[in-house]
Image (spheres, coloured by chain):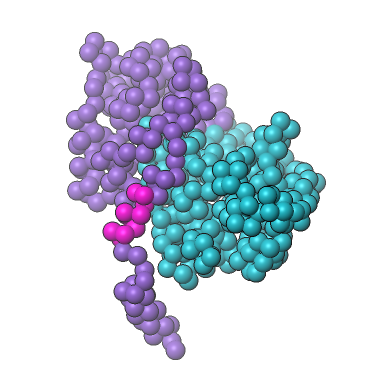
Amino acid sequence: MPCAFAQSTVDEIAKYRAALQDGNPAELWEARGEALWKQKRGPKQVSFEQCDLGLGAGVVKGAYARLPRYFADADRVMDLETRLVWCMVKLQGYSEADALKNPFGSGNEKKSDMEALVAYVTSESRGAKMNVALSHPKEEQMYRLGEKMFYFRGGPHDFACATCHGEDGKRIRLQDLPNLTGTEGAQKAYTTWPAYRVSQGELRSFQWRLYDCFRQQRFPELIFASDASVALTMFLARNANGVAFDAPAIKR
Amino acid sequence: MNGRESLVSLALLSITLGCATAPSSEEIAANAAAMLKSSFKANGQASLDRLKQDETQALCSQLAGKPPSKEVAARIEKINRDAIKYPADGKLLGDWKNGEKIAQEGRGKQFSDDPAGPVGANCYACHQLAPQELSFGTIGPSLYQFGKLRGYGADTQRYAYGKIYNSEAYAACSNMPRFGHSGILNEQQLKDVTALLMDPQSPVNK
């Protein structure tokens, strides 16, 4: 009875995931991120406490649950990382190249300040209801571009995001795949990133999630904080509206 | 305001907004092209030409998850069927044991993969095949007893080889990669995977 066995394997994986919830190392990233947020940094020696994530300068509480959004000062729709880069350049005086380098850490070898900042800011939206607006025309446009990107098939394997995330109840090997075209699937997936990945010993941001999906799609490398990354984030964040954000989470 | 009225006023509102501000489909398409160009960079074997769509990829992307119309499906299946190249020696079945290895192998073509390293078909990611392998995905149908259920005749062999070579020839906008058409597997590998499905001795048919 291979199917029965496979089902019990899936159950065991679910138990393993439940056991992981008790004590999440993501807290280490959150604490480091909070310190970085408050530290005077960069050539101008300014802290992020002057950085406006959309709810006013320095307001972190609940900010992530409303991102991405249009920022008039930049005349651009930004996700959290894009906005942090903007603040690093405009407020703290970093060069754009310096602000963009090292977006993802790799265990103990290389720590990423960006991922720590993302852990801290997102943790301050835990419990906040996802509420991403499409009220500005550029927000609407970004959402539609994200939808286009989601269905874009390319590369040697003809893969799009939708190839794996377009139907309910599918899996790759034994890994369940969220259907990101439906509200429930998008809510469950989007509100549980960032996550501490046990298999990698790393806190992973949503930007990383997208980067690594495209790697597996056999696409060229998704550029960190690029328009396509923001557009897809907009598409998925908006589709997740209505439920409480619940991350940083912990995942296999 | 009742439900119908609010729907009508919503529709009017969206038309008004549509005229004033919302981007047109042409605008979105132009911006999508610019977005693609600025958002990816070549990394190792994954060069930017992977973002240039052929007709099949472009047509299927435009559907945004909906099934193709009869006409579009016929067009896609025809151009892909015409492009199938069957082996010159006429033999379609290789070694099912190698086929099983290829079906298990998930590496190949990612920018993180060694370009000189193995390239697999990763069949088990999406399909059930040999019953001994319990870790299989469900994006595609179960292929357990593929040959046993359909018979081992020449026509079925040709269908199986063609489907692996170019899935779009038989099911327009299928999720399955075109393993021969897109140069993922070589001819011997295609024969080996066909044997995994079609050899009576293969565990798939036990």
Q: Residue at x 62, y 39 (%)?
A: A102
B149 to the left or right of A125: left
Q: Is residue B195 above or below residue A93?
A: above
State the predominant SS element of the stretch in magenta: helix
Q: Is residue B103 above or below residue B8?
A: above
Q: Residue at x 52, y 28 (%)?
A: B112
Q: Residue furthest bottom?
A: B1
**Horizontal and vertical percent position of residue B102:** 46, 20
**Horizontal and vertical percent position of residue B114:** 50, 21
**Horizontal and vertical percent position of residue A31:** 79, 50
Residue A47, quarter of the rendered image: bottom right
A220 to the left or right of B172: right
Report the front residue among A23 and A228: A228
Q: Residue at x 69, y 49 (%)?
A: A42
The answer to whether any part of residue A236 appears in the image is no
**Horizontal and vertical percent position of residue B188:** 35, 14
Report the front residue among A196 and B45: B45
Residue range (magenta)? B25-34
Q: Is residue B60 above or below residue B162?
A: below
Residue A8, quarter of the rendered image: top right
A19 to the left or right of B108: right
Q: Residue at x 28, y 38 (%)?
A: B54
Colour of chain B in the rendered structure image: purple
Q: Residue furthest front?
A: A43
The answer to whether any part of residue B35 appears in the image is yes
Colour of chain A in the rendered structure image: cyan
Report the front residue among A100 and A141: A100
Q: In which quadrant is the N terminus of chain B drawn? A: bottom left
B125 to the left or right of B47: right
